[in-house]
Amino acid sequence: MIRSVITGTGSALPVRRVSNAELAETVDTSDDWIVERTGIRFRHLAGPDETTGTLAADAARRALAAAGCAAGEIDLIVLATATPDQTFPATATKVQALLGIDDCVAFDVAAVCSGFLYALQVADSMIRTGAHARALVIGAETFSRILDWQDRTTCVLFGDGAGAIVIEARDSGEEGPGIIAIKLHADGRHNQLLYVDGGPSTTGTVGLLRMKGGEVFRHAVTNLAAVLEETLVIAGLTSADIDWVVPHQANKRILDATARKLGLPAEKVIVTVDQHANTSAASVPLALDVAIRDQRIMPGQLIVLEAMGGGFTWGAAVVRT
Ligand code: COA
């Protein structure tokens, strides 16, 4: 049975780390409010020389090193982002150039905070057809560039960063490592609850992020619990089989409420939102890399990845490490 196996992970964060207290010097907010409502304590914000593409390339280099794989062995790059370096070309091709890969397939996927799950599904499918042997799947964002820094209800929630994984086609057997199941959803009826008020084809500007936070929160808990259940059923597993949940890191209260709904103990949930805030498409691979490097996630374990974002889009994946 050919499966896509994760052979290496990597991540990258901008140098500048900003605390809630530092934000409160310029925004009408407080450390207490942000921690109590979201669990966020810090976020990293990109400097002028740091872009989605450079962060993605740094994360990719670390993933390649962890996989023991040379850049030239990669034949597919799928990069999830809502904050590309330019409208075109795809930021994936910038990463390709920065890594010195002369020829491979490279393109971006846009599904906002669920982007990494979407990119994973696309890359996994392309690997399982036999067309590709080794892929970089990347989630990378610089949301600080599309935040309205006058709007305290949104600007305190997001950060910048990148996460990358290398996946390889392997015949690993029924109980072996690999991506076991992925389930994705989208419901465009809700695309006015979380969006950017600009774009090349409408205003001709980049635009700024707008969100009805309370409504997003309610949908997130319902949709994430449902898609987790659904993906476990597809994989023939129950929540009791799962060693770790690696959720999209939007809000600690969403993580807690979703885990409670599924009867999953909080100790099984990887939490990085306190350190990175919401890094959109980067958050799942970033959290995965943190938990693999600190050796909470070990080889042979069953993990679940999940995310929900603007669109709405949402999804989950079951993976054996
Ligand atoms: N600092 C201080 N006060 C703030 C604030 C901030 N940064 N942001 C909002 N407030 C105020 C509001 O103005 C409001 O004041 P009022 O009662 O005087 O009008 C009060 O805090 C409560 O606001 P509310 O929006 O009801 O808070 P909440 O408990 O719903 O939390 C979010 C707001 C945004 C943290 C929460 O709704 C959320 O996390 N939503 C999901 C967001 C998300 O995950 N999006 C990404 C999905 S990919």
Image (spheres, rainbow, N blue to C red):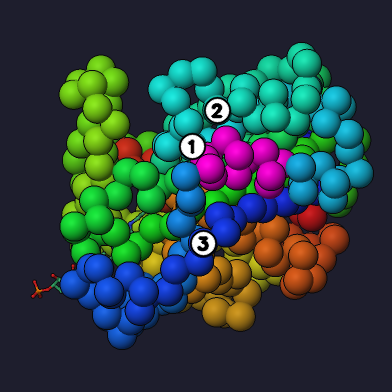
User: In the figure, is residue 217 to the left or right of 104?
Assistant: left
**Residue ranking furthest to the bottom:** 32
Element type at marker 3?
strand
Can the viewer see residue 87?
yes
Mark 2 lies on residue: 91
Mark 1 lies on residue: 81
Q: Is residue 55 inside the magenta stretch?
A: yes
Mark 3 lies on residue: 16
Residue 177's spot in the image, x, y percent? Answer: 83, 49
Q: Earlier in the sequence, mark 1 or mark 2?
A: 1
Q: Quadrant of ligand 1?
A: bottom left
> Bounds of the magenta span?
49-60
Instruction: Give the spatial CA distance, label 2 vs label 3.
Output: 22 Å
Q: Is residue 130 inside the magenta stretch?
A: no
Taking the spot 75% from the left edge, 30% from the top edge, the residue there is 99
Question: Does mark 1's beta carbon lie closer than 8 Å to ligand 1?
Answer: no
Above or below — where is 169 with respect to 195?
Answer: above
